[in-house]
């Protein structure tokens, strides 16, 4: 058998690879946590239905992981980010998650998350040369 490294972009191959990892991980997790996966999508919409912000996350086994939390610049400071975060936390609690994890860059929302009770558990220096990449969590 010959094998090679390919640089092709393939939705099917990507899904297959992710599914293989998921199946492998299932063998190692406690039975009561197997199959716990759910996408979370929360949006801030204006009167015309245009998306002005949102939070994208997923529940995986016993945690919720936030991938994106974004609010239009003109709406920042109006509490929408906090409302999105609190709704995600409420959902995580309802779904019996033990913690929430999130990452942010030094020019993004570190103070915002800390204000909401998230604690730093890791940091990468020299990201984009001049920035830091923070990893935070909040136990529920």
Image (cartoon, rainbow, N blue to C red):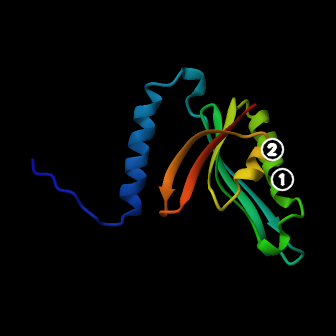
Q: Residue at x 77, y 71 (%)?
A: 72
Q: CA distance from mark 2 to mark 1?
A: 8 Å
On residue 32, which mark appears?
Answer: none
Q: Earlier in the sequence, mark 2 or mark 1?
A: 1
Q: Is residue 21 above or below residue 56?
A: above
Residue 136 rendering spot, x and y as whole percentages: 64, 42
Against 97, is 54 above or below? below
Q: Determine the residue positioned at 54% across, 21% down.
A: 30
Horizontal placement of 120 versus 71: left or right?
Answer: left
- How busy is the neighbourhood of tag 1: few (under 14 within 10 Å), some, or many (20 plus)? some
Quick check: 39 left or right of 140? left
For this orientation, the residue located farthest to the left is 1
The residue where tag 1 is placed is 82
The answer to whether residue 123 is above or below residue 129 is: above
Specify the quadrant of the image occupied by residue 14: bottom left
Observer-nearest of 51 and 80: 80
Q: Secondary structure at mark 1?
A: helix
Q: Are marks 2 and 1 in contact (CB under 8 Å)?
A: yes
Q: Is residue 38 visible?
A: no
Residue occupied by mark 2 = 116
Identity of the residue furthest to the front in this view: 130
Taking depth in this image into account, of 30 and 67 the one nearest to the observer is: 67
């Amino acid at each position: 058998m010959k094998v090679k490294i390919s640089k092709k972009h393939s939705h099917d191959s990507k899904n297959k690879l992710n599914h293989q990892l998921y199946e492998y991980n299932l063998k190692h997790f406690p039975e009561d946590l197997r199959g716990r996966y759910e996408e979370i999508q929360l949006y801030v919409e204006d009167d015309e239905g245009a998306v002005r912000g949102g939070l994208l996350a997923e529940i995986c086994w016993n945690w919720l992981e936030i991938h994106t939390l974004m609010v239009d610049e003109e709406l920042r400071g109006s509490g929408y980010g906090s409302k999105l975060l609190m709704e995600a936390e409420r959902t995580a609690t309802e779904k019996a998650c033990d913690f929430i994890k999130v990452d942010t860059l030094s020019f993004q929302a570190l103070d915002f998350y800390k204000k909401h009770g998230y604690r730093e558990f890791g940091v990468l220096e020299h990201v984009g040369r001049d920035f830091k990449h923070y990893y935070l969590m909040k136990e529920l």
